[in-house]
Every structure is written in C-alpha cells, then in structure tokens.
Image (cartoon, helix red, strand yellow):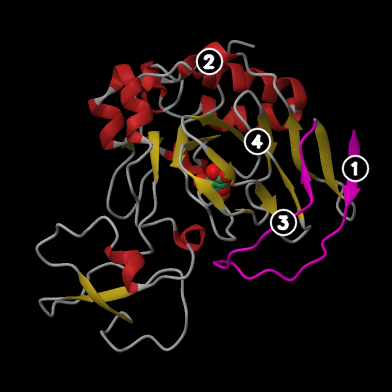
Amino acid sequence: MEKYISKKVEVELGNFYHCDHIYNESVDIYDADTGDIIFLLRKNIIPAGYYELHEGLIKHSQATSSNRGNASGKVTIQGLVRGKESWKAFPSKLCDRKGNPLTKEASSSYFIYNDGRLSKRARSNTVSSSAIGGFDKSPQHPCRLTHWTKHHLKQYESIFPLCKYVSDRYFEYFPDKWLHQYETYLNSPKDFVIPDTNFSTITLNNTFRTAAHQDKGDCKKGLTCFTVKKIGNYSGGELHFPDYDVGVNVEQGDLLIFNPHITHCNNAIKGQGRVSFVFYLREKMDRCPQEDSKKLVSTL
Ligand SMILES: O=C(O)CCC(=O)C(=O)O
Ligand SMILES: [Fe+2]
C-alpha cells in the first residue's frame, strides 16, 4: 500500500509525543507536498537467523551516551547524573557555558560538579544508546572505529550478515538513493565501513524512548535502515513521525527504511528488552584520509 500524507502538527524538538496512528503492515508513506519518501515498512521479511548476534554485542546495547541531544529529551540534573552515580565528582547544577544558571529548557547543558568545577562540555541526559562501527572526524577524535568496536571485532562482525541483508533490501526498494549513497561509501576508507553494505555505522539502543529529534551526521543523499530485536518483555515504543502524526510498529523480523532528517520519536515503552538497530552511513566518512590501496572498488 502506498499513501501520501501531509504535516499536521507543530512539533518541538526535545519534547515527548504519543501517536495512536500506528501502521502494523507493509506500507510506503510519502509526503503529499514534496512526493518524498517518509518511510517504507516491510513486516516479517528478515529471517530469524540474522538476529543471532554475539551475546557481547547485545550486552553492549546497554552502553550509555550523554550526547544524544534532542533524542534524550530536555536535560535535567537527574538525567545527567544517571549512570554517573559512582563518579567521584558528579553533576550537581545545570548552567550555561560561563556557569550562570540556565534560563530556558534545553536538550543539552553545561553543569557544575558537586566539587564546584564547571564542566568543559555540554551534555544531554544519559540514555542507553551507543554507536558501533566507523565514525568520521569530530573535534575530539580523528576518523576511527569506535572504541568498543576496535576492541571487540569478533562481536562486531557478528552483525555483518544482518547489515548485508538489510543493505540488499535497501538497494531493491530505493536503488537511486542507494547508489547515490554508495558513491560516498566507495570513497570511504575500507577499514571504517561495513563490508558488502552501504553503511559505516550502527546506532544500538536498548529500551530507549527517544524524544522528538532528527538524526545528525548521516549521508543526506541516502536513507536509514532500522530493525528491532526483542530480548525481553516490553510493549509500546512504536517509532513515529509527530509532524505527520503517523508511526510504525517495528518488531523483530521487520525492516523500516526512513528519512532520518524528518523529526521522529517513540511512544512510551513498558517493560524492558527492546534493542533497536539504526544502520546508516556517516556523511563525512569520504573525507577520512586513506591510503590508495585501501580504497573500495565498485563491485557493481
Ligand atoms: O529505537 C528507535 O525506535 C528509534 C531510534 C532513533 O531514532 C535513534 O537512535 O536515532
Ligand atoms: Fe533517530
């Protein structure tokens, strides 16, 4: 089924939304005004074997991040402290860059430690989300495999078959976008991308209810692929696009291909054990330095 829909709601990034209009069947949804794809959902097309991942990788989905920005909601002091309870010095008060009290809500903030020091970097609420695979250059780091990835290559490689299966479906459904994205992939260092796919990076989330956000750093020429593995008893967590007041129920076996620059978020999750995988290509991966011998060669 194909459908064309229009924006309905004024959405504020960093806020939580609930959506009741959830698709639970294979469907392609386009923006009625631009004709662009919003998402494509295919139910029950990924065979169970692809979800047999290394236990260590599943465990790693519990790793936390304090840089998910809008996705982690409006920052609070409790949200910042979460996961840092054992730190000697922990955040005790939100503030601006200079240490003055915050005057309005934000999704990330500087803070003052309980020992009086001012934080060097702004942070957002701590959430169970982490990136594995390659990462492009940032102010803090050069191009690289993420720290966990580099130290757990075998665990990381256990997800390659799922990545390839997902990438092959992406090519079938959106060959033009796939090929555009593939230009960037081919110009990226071989060691920092996922072989035989169109991806460099996977975001792993564990029972993470995102607030309204748009993904950053991914290749604008392409699309993002997404699936879920169920490892516990949970309900809810449907991913939705609040501007359009429409969403999807992505379960194990389902593939979602969507435009990650359209604002999206999740319904509340009851229980635990929703591990989600976001497959994408870092946009600036092709700017990473590489030796000529390590360039990828087109196999098409
Ligand atoms: O897990 C989900 O349903 C959404 C995840 C997401 O949008 C993200 O990690 O950016
Ligand atoms: Fe996202």
> Mark 2 or 3, which is nearer the eye?
3
Q: Any mark on residue 50, and which? A: 2
> Mark 3 or 1, which is nearer the eye?
3
- Nearer the N terminus, badge 1 or badge 2? 1
Residue linked to disc 1: 3
Label 2 and label 3: CA atoms lie apart by 30 Å
Magenta-tinted stretch:
1-25
Amino acid under label 1? Lys
As for residue 4 lying within the magenta part, the answer is yes
Amino acid under label 4? Val
Amino acid under label 3? Cys
What predominant SS class does the magenta segment belong to? Answer: loop
Q: Any mark on residue 250, and which? A: 4
Q: Any atom of ligand 1 within 8 Å of the CB at mark 4?
A: yes
Is 19 positioned to the left or the right of 181 in the image? right
Place residue 100 in its image quadrant: bottom left
